[in-house]
Amino acid sequence: MERFVVLEGVAAPLDRSKVDTDQILPARFLRRPRKEGYAQFLFRDWRDDPGFVLNRDAFRAARILVADRNFGGGSSREQAPWALADYGIRCVIAADFGDIFYANALKTGVLPVVLEARVCQALRGALHARPGARMRVDLPAQAVTAPDGATYPFAIDPFHKQCLLEGLDDVGITLQHEAAIAAFESRYRQRFGWLFHGNV
Amino acid sequence: MGRTLYEKVWDAHAIVEGHGGQTLLHVGRHLVHDGSMHAFEFLHERGLKVRRPDQAFATPDHGVSTLVHRIEAIADAEQRRVVQLLARNTRAAGIVHFSLEDPRQGIVHVVGPEQGITQPGLVIVCGDSHTSTHGALGALAFGAGASEITHVLATQTTWQRRSKTMRIAVDGALPEGVTAKDVILAIIARVGANGAAGHVIEYAGTTIRAMSIEERLTVCNMSIEAGARAGMIAPDETTFAYLAGRPYAPAGAAWDEALAYWRTLPSDADARFDAEVSLDATALAPMVTWGNSPEDACPVTGTVPDPAAEADPERRAYLRRTLDYMGLAPGMALTDIAVDQVFIGSCTNARLEDLRAAARVARRGRAKVPVLVSPGSTQVKLAAEKEGLDRVFRAAGFEWRESGCSMCVAMNGDVVPAGKRCASTSNRNFVGRQGKGSRTHLLSPAMAAAAALTGRITDVRTL
Ligand code: SF4
């Protein structure tokens, strides 16, 4: 995973609530090999519309997306954050996120930031007023800086913060707990023996 | 203070607690389907092995052809490749695989309970959001993306934040024509599409208690449509009777041991929930969705909302673009909506009881529009054929197919064409879900069959 420390870049306003993962990455592209990249499939069915925000010159190079309520609900497809990351968007700000999308984004190095709905709305308004304006997302300080310089704090679990800051993938962290896992497994197999009768 | 069902299952699987807000949980059972190729690829790239192949079970569903269960019948090369990869990856790892030709094949969320793989008290993970289904038997079951699945394959564990708990109590007898699907649609309409975010739901109350396991599976299946991490129902005599004798369920002395444990799982009387919701089942009607979010559900006797009457600008904008996409006029009666086709299938509503309910309606007429019926598993298909349901469907002009996800996600070639309208027993009505430009109305199997006979959304109680 690519590290995430401080991100500064163009922010694009996405004036829609309930952007589900089928919109972020339609199902017909799910089977594409990861290595070929997913950038061209991001919001694929909206990209035909010349008025769509990422089709406007000022927002094409967006690195931050400011959305509305309920971003990323629906399917568990990690391909949705892959498409965002491959396009260059490393941070999505919204009032709330689909639970699985939130987890998948963190694993992809895309930072999901929860800010109040009215703050998201104000930020989108500011970005419309000054197309191409930049914002700053500071993970160590856990703060977002709006185009006008105002800052907004956000929350993140220390575990995820550490993974992002160091570009760590959690399999490595988990394997450090090998002794605890092995001990747990042998207890589990004893206690729930019926789960292991004649499976294979 | 007492503990909830969720907390008991969590505690029994916690390995390392409180690591920066996260807990390392053991995964009791991992369910695998043909979408798992990315996770296996990541695993191989890192030179890691499947840690506990005996705790994983696989079956192809998303990409399989419903015309005939043969690999050559999968028209799309990518889908064919991933179904083949599933066979290869599971064979190499030593994971049980119910292949295309195996009579135990089916949609992963139908197969788990059916085979007795899903059991009370387990943490179950699968690379699919509708993993919440398995909570119907008292398991803690949730979906995950490819990297998380790689993690589960490699370590048989998952890092999770403890969720808040929400109890949804549904009480009273269901009126005639009202089904489990209508109950869960009514719940989502009430709670909102992300209203249960950060929570695990426990469904309780007399209505839920009176439900069969198949009905409970329908309810828990759509927990994710309310944004919940998972949905659960305390195991009871209905659960135990359902599990007894299933292939992977314990037997003999092991059954007694398991049963004694399962009986300890229900939430304690003094357990506290972070949120409480209650619903009067006696006031419910058959439900149908008009929009592009499962929360856009209302009684079939209702009308399409009017954006002009909406005060909130964000909501008004949503209504405008949704009615435009769905091709609906404000204020029109839902029963005036003509449909082009009907889909009876998916992990929500394609078990035997669902097919029986659809067949009861199908007996009363002939389809006016094309209808595709895809049983949730090959076992369901065989059982339905034994009862003659396939003949009932065929006599009514419904098409009887093989099992798979089919038109629920439109990855296997079963697609609703752009601009066409489908009455569907599946779980998502998102823009383009059943194919680019498709329009979906979610409803119960009986309501879907009624729509098939009349060619429009129909109140099954008036048919
Ligand atoms: S039937 Fe639909 S919802 Fe269920 S697993 Fe398949 S694609 Fe997902």
Image (cartoon, coloured by chain):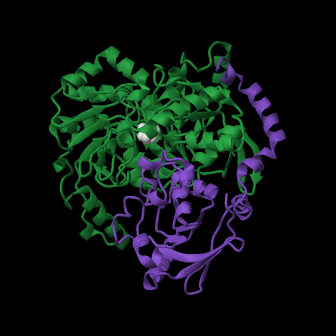
- Classify B247 as above or below A53: above
Residue plotted at (28% across, 53% down): B290
Which residue ends up furthest to the right in the rendered image?
A179
* Chain A representation colour: purple
Residue that protrudes farthest toward the top in the picture:
B252
Q: Where is residue B412 in the image (x, y as percent from the top left)?
A: 38, 38
How far across and how far down the image is residue B161, in percent? 66, 52
In the foreground, B196 or A19: A19
User: Ligand 1: which quarter?
Assistant: top left
Note whether residue B140 is visible: yes
Viewer-nearest residue: B364 or B340: B340
Report the residue that reaches farthest toward the bottom: A148
Left of B71 or right of it: where is B202?
Answer: right
In depth, the one of B272 and B49 nearer the eye is B49
x, y (%) of residue B268?
Answer: 63, 39
Figure check: B357 above or below B268: above
Splitting the image into 4 quarters, where does residue B57 fall?
Answer: top right
Examine the image and state in which quarter residue B327 appears: bottom left
In the rendered image, which quarter contains the C terminus of chain B? top left
Identity of the residue drawn at 56% across and 81% down: A146
The answer to whether residue B286 is seen in the rendering is no
In the rendered image of this protein, does residue A182 appear above or below residue B377?
below
Q: Nearer the viewer, residue B286 or B438?
A: B438
Q: Residue at x 32, y 72 (%)?
A: B311
- Residue A159 image point, x, y percent: 72, 58
| Image colour assigned to chain B | green
Task: State the residue at coordinates (74%, 27%).
Answer: A189
Q: In which quarter of the image is residue B393?
A: top left
Does residue A74 appear to the left or right of B251 in the view shown? left
| Residue A156 appears left or right of B324 | right
Q: How many marks?
A: 0
Side (left or right) of A185 relative to B279: right
